[in-house]
């Protein structure tokens, strides 16, 4: 918090965040970073204008008595004829080009005072996009589905970005007003209501945030200072952000305040940082470490989690600040996804070409996390990744689907639509029982028939440029001839909305996920997520086993056979040997009829072992005679 009395502006008014409009019920304090501007003023819609006072550190600020919630305003600069939205606006009811609206954060009646927050261990994450999660596409309509997620075994929602963006629809990664929840989904209080409802059900909620670029339309930061951006680094999504050059203070304080804001004001349980490989910062401390510190300070006694998407797979993001890292709790594991998808579908184009979907790859991903930890990637023609030794298994976020990977099929097809049902069931078991932290993508649990493709409602000429850019990106996949769904077409957006009737209609898929998550949650061996708690062996060109070590010989075996039936008199493999005085007994099978399977056959008899093709099997060590 910042006491503005140090600047003599309004003695006794204590700000919560570095920038933006903060209301105390009788008036509002405004603060804007504009170090090279001579004068800054608040221009209200009723025509009144109030000058701000220049501070010593590049900010302009001031308290306006009688400026109340619901009042709309813009910010005038150097007496110019044009005024702009507040860069730290709390609400843009008419979109990013419209006026900003004052919000009183104290008005919402929170009921989660006893909510302890969440830690990463034990979580089952569910990624969703608010606009397509329900037919209504709002926070209020999404509340209705929360009990179904909870009953399934989900523990944490990961919400795709909601910062205000241009247009009627979009993924959210082109946000321009980072403090303003997108008006197309509802009001700021609607977002708070969603989080409060989730907490009441025992669900955590984390927010996907974008600190590597701003969207191409509706961003007015340069009107206040050019130093928010830099030409020092390349950025595939627009201008790079200035975290380490001259004048970087404004952006650094803006972003760390934003991270804290989502935690403190909206009670989010953490953040997922998008594409941290494009957050360039050679200064110390690194901005991501600063974000980590700001989030934890904002959370107070609540536990929060921070997750990074690191395409270049640098383990430093997930190491503690005390050990020279940047303080994230978890990191997405693309390598597991890529290898598993090659095994499931047989397709290995573009960035999948580094992977073969072999049992050894899958075993290595299970044991070590990333597959590329510094060796050369043929696809990228450079070294990829860094060693991850010392990281906990739970720190690796595992997935078979996410928003990017489903959309990168161009048609937005789900895995169940392009893979053998039996093979997919086997890999679902692998994914949900591994000691990493599993993440499902909306609708995956009930085999949604709705696609998820790229959509973005941009004005011309950006709309055409976005479509060309998306088509160019997809050309890396030889099996994709063209982009079928124009990103700016409302029909493209509408076709991605989930049909929640399918949750009941596709009961076999729901039962599969529900039972596996219950097994993961209730079984002491699978729930332990122990470091060095598994080992594995290759059994055939498309079959392997994983042994999960429990306490005092209470072990589990997971067989995954995604090839033909295996009938083998014996296996010369010590990991198959049961603990002394024990035998293996069936615990779970992907071939159960309630999942759509053919029925569970004996896995061992007097003729040897029998592993059904395209299936997974879980065995439990049980003392002989019991």
Image (cartoon, helix red, strand yellow):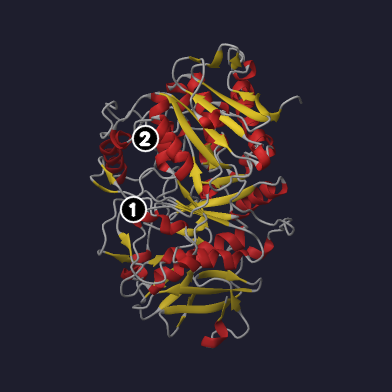
Q: Is residue 589 visible?
A: yes
Residue 604 point in image, percent of width and height = 59, 17
Q: Residues within 10 Å of mark 1 (few under 14, many from 20)?
A: some
Which callout, 1 or 2, points at the residue further toward the start of the chain?
Answer: 1
Residue 242 in the image: x percent, y percent? 33, 66
Q: Residue at x 61, y 26 (%)?
A: 512
Q: Please tell me whether residue 88 is drawn above or below residue 331 in the rendered image.
A: below
Task: Look at the image and tell me whether residue 498 can be seen.
Answer: no
Of tags 1 and 2, which is closer to the observer? Answer: 2
Q: Residue furthest right?
A: 626
Q: Give the alpha-carbon distance from disc 1 to disc 2, as whole Å.
A: 22 Å
Report the residue marked by disc 1: 216
315 relative to 544, above or below: below
Q: 411 left or right of 625?
A: left
The x and y percentages for residue 540 are 42, 23
Q: Is residue 211 left or right of residue 108?
A: left
Which residue in the protein does label 2 denote? 408
Do the numbered discs 1 and 2 sit on residues whose CB atoms are within 8 Å?
no
Q: Residue at x 61, y 33 (%)?
A: 556
Quadrant that contains the C terminus: top right
Q: Is residue 59 left or right of residue 464?
A: right
Q: Quadrant of residue 149?
A: top right
Q: Where does residue 410 sit, x and y in percent of width and height?
A: 35, 31
SS class, disc 1: loop
Q: Nearer the viewer, residue 545 or 375?
A: 545
Say which mark, if any, is on residue 450. none
Q: Residue at x 60, y 39 (%)?
A: 549
**Element type at mark 2:** loop
């Amino acid at each position: 918090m910042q006491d503005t009395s140090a600047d003599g502006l309004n003695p006794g008014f204590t700000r919560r965040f570095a920038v933006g409009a903060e209301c105390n019920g009788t008036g509002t304090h405004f603060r804007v970073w504009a170090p090279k501007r001579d004068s800054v003023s608040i221009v209200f819609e009723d025509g009144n204008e109030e000058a701000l006072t220049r501070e010593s550190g590049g900010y302009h600020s001031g308290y306006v008595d009688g400026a109340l919630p619901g009042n709309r305003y813009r910010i005038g600069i150097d007496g110019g004829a044009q005024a702009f939205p507040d860069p730290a606006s709390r609400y843009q009811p008419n979109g990013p080009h419209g006026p900003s609206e004052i919000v009183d954060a104290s008005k919402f009646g929170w009921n989660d005072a006893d909510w302890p927050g969440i830690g990463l261990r034990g979580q089952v994450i569910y990624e969703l996009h608010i606009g397509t999660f329900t037919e209504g596409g709002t926070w209020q309509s999404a509340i209705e589905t929360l009990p179904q997620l909870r009953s399934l075994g989900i523990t944490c929602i990961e919400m795709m970005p909601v910062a205000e963006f241009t247009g009627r629809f979009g993924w959210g990664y082109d946000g321009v007003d980072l403090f303003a929840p997108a008006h197309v989904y509802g009001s700021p209080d609607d977002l708070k209501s969603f989080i409060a409802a989730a907490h009441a059900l025992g669900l955590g909620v984390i927010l996907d945030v974008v600190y590597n670029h701003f969207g191409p339309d509706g961003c007015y930061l340069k009107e206040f200072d050019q130093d928010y951006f830099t030409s020092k680094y390349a950025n595939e999504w627009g201008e790079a952000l200035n975290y380490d050059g001259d004048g970087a203070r404004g952006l650094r304080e803006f972003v760390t305040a934003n991270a804290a804001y989502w935690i403190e004001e909206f009670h989010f349980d953490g953040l997922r940082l998008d594409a941290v490989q494009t957050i360039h910062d050679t200064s110390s401390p690194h901005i991501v470490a600063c974000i980590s510190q700001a989030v934890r300070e904002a959370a107070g006694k609540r536990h929060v989690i921070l997750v990074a998407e690191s395409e270049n797979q640098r383990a430093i993001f997930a190491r503690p600040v005390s050990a020279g890292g940047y303080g994230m709790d978890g990191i997405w594991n693309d390598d597991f996804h890529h290898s598993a998808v090659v095994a499931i579908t047989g397709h290995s184009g573009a960035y999948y070409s580094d992977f073969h979907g072999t049992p050894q790859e899958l075993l290595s991903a299970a044991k070590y996390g990333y597959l590329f930890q510094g060796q050369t990637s043929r696809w990228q023609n450079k070294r990829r990744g860094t060693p991850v030794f010392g990281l906990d298994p739970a720190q690796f976020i595992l997935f078979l689907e996410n928003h990017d990977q489903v959309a990168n099929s161009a048609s937005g097809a789900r895995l169940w639509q392009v893979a053998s049902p039996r093979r997919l069931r086997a890999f679902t078991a692998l994914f949900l029982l591994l000691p990493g932290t599993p993440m499902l993508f909306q609708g995956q649990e009930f085999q949604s028939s709705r696609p998820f493709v790229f959509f973005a409602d941009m004005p011309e000429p950006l709309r055409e440029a976005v479509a060309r850019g998306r088509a160019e990106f997809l050309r890396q996949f030889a099996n994709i001839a063209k982009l079928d769904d124009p990103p700016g077409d409302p029909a493209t957006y509408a076709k991605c909305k989930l049909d929640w009737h399918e949750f009941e209609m596709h009961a076999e898929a729901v039962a599969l996920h529900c039972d596996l998550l219950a097994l993961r949650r209730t079984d002491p061996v699978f729930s332990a997520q122990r470091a060095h708690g598994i080992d594995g062996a290759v059994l055939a060109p498309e079959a392997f086993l994983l042994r999960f070590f429990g306490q005092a010989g209470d072990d589990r075996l997971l067989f995954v056979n995604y090839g033909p039936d295996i009938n083998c008199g014996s296996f010369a493999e010590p990991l198959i040997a049961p603990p002394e005085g024990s035998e293996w007994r069936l615990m779970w099978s992907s071939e159960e009829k309630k999942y759509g399977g053919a029925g569970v056959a004996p896995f061992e008899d007097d003729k040897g072992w029998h592993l059904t093709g395209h299936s997974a099997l879980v065995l439990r060590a049980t003392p002989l005679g019991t």
